Image: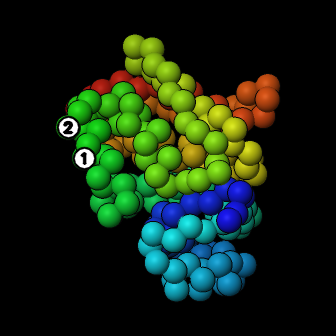
Amino acid sequence: MSTSAEIKASYFQANIDAIALLGPRRVEVEARLAREIEATRMASRADWLPMAWDEKLSAAIADVGGDEAVIACNKASFLAATEGTFLRPFTQAAARLFGVSPRGMLKHAHAAWAAGSRHAGHMVVTFTAESATVELIGMRADPIWCVGVVGILEGVLALTSHDGSAEMRFATDGHPVYDVRWQPRTP
């Protein structure tokens, strides 16, 4: 049994699909991850895959498009996953229980994190009026992978039709911390 961080194959597949945003540069990323992409396509959606593959994917995306491409691909992947079999139940449950708002979605985010990753620490979310702090306690990952989580949090804002921002920093012990701020989108 592995004690290295792992993610669900369905979520890694969504991340692979999101590199379509890179246009012709996606070929470079696909070449660097050919073995991982093939193994993922052969895997069951419920299988666990090494999170190191997702870190490698983030690094390859950053090499061809910078941090902005990593954020954009993660946002697209998250939004696509909310329509799929993995995240749709979580987003629907959060909407029913807490409302369609960043606060509502983030109140349920720890459950999605726990279901979609293992040996990857745990998520803690604390709230103020129009903001939240999201911490991945015990998570140790490549910094560029951590940048990608900003895209996921921007996806939460887009999903809930709110404007705002997500910024990343590292706590003194090295785990990633995200500061998320929002306000309702103005027409």
Secondary structure under badge 1? helix
In this image, 60 relative to 39: left or right?
Answer: right
Q: Position of residue 5 (x, y in %)?
A: 67, 56
In this figure, which residue is indicated by the disc labeled 1? 92
Specify the quadrant that holds the N terminus. bottom right
Q: Position of residue 36 (x, y in %)?
A: 65, 78
Specify the quadrant that holds the C terminus. top left
- Give the farthest residue toward the top: 129
User: In the displayed structure, would residue 124 be above or below residue 74?
Assistant: above
Q: Would residue 69 be visible to someone looking at this image?
A: no
Q: Residue at x 46, y 78 (%)?
A: 44
Mark on residue 96?
2
The CA span between labels 1 and 2 is 6 Å
Q: Are marks 1 and 2 in contact (CB under 8 Å)?
A: yes
Q: Residue at x 41, y 26 (%)?
A: 182
- Give the farthest residue toward the left: 96
Secondary structure under badge 2? helix
Q: Position of residue 186 (x, y in %)?
A: 27, 28
Mark 2 belongs to which amino acid?
A: Arg
Q: Would residue 47 be visible to someone looking at this image?
A: yes
